[in-house]
Image (cartoon, rainbow, N blue to C red):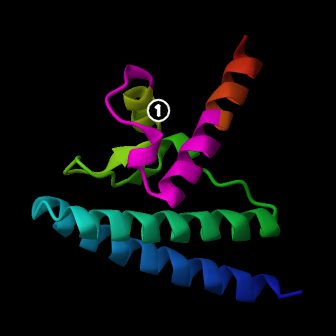
Amino acid sequence: MRSEKDIRLRIDLLEGQAGSIAKILAKAMQEHDEEAIKQYSEKLAQRKSQVEELLWVLGIKSAQSILDTKTGIPGMHELVAIRDILELLKQGKIRMDDLTLDVQALVRKGALEARNAMKYTT
């Protein structure tokens, strides 16, 4: 098993990569490049998922809710929070098939988190 220091270094590396990818994604959104938006939103979701897994290994729950995680979706020219994507799905403005596989996974995690949050507040 890796040492805690190695895991924290890996988390820092992945977060740095995620930041760079987010900047590229924002530029692609400004340029309305649908293919780049799809490609980089998928990469960003992968990095976020990897960081989340490593934090879980360390026993640290991410301070940020998955619902607040922002990602790109085709047809939108700005980053959208998972909670907002869930609303767009409910309203029928987008379909799950329109999203990349990694964003679909984040949406599913977000839906579970929202359901669990509602369960504990009622």
Q: Which residue is mark 1?
A: 86
- Residue 97 falls inside the magenta stretch: yes
Depth order, front residue of 76/61 = 76
Depth order, front residue of 36/117 = 36
In the rendered image of this protein, does residue 101 appear above or below residue 18?
above
Q: Residue at x 67, y 26 (%)?
A: 115
Q: Residue at x 50, y 74 (%)?
A: 15
Query: Residue reaching furthest front?
Result: 97
In the rendered image of this protein, does residue 58 appear above or below residue 81?
below
In the rendered image of this protein, does residue 67 appear above or below residue 32?
above
Alpha-carbon neighbours of circle 1 within 10 Å: few (<14), some, or many (≥20)? Answer: some
In the rendered image of this protein, does residue 28 appear above or below residue 73?
below
Q: Is residue 64 visible to the viewer in this orientation of the structure?
A: no
Q: Position of residue 7 (x, y in %)?
A: 72, 82
Query: Residue reaching furthest left?
Result: 31
Q: Main secondary structure of the magenta part?
A: helix
Q: Is residue 24 left or right of residue 110?
A: left
- Residue 101 falls inside the magenta stretch: yes
User: Image quadrant of residue 2?
Assistant: bottom right
Depth order, front residue of 50/100 = 100
User: Image quadrant of residue 85?
Assistant: top left
Q: Is residue 11 left or right of residue 16?
A: right
* Badge 1 element: helix
Q: Residue at x 71, y 66 (%)?
A: 53
Q: Residue at x 44, y 57 (%)?
A: 100
Mark 1 residue type: Leu
In the image, the segment drawn in magenta is 90-111
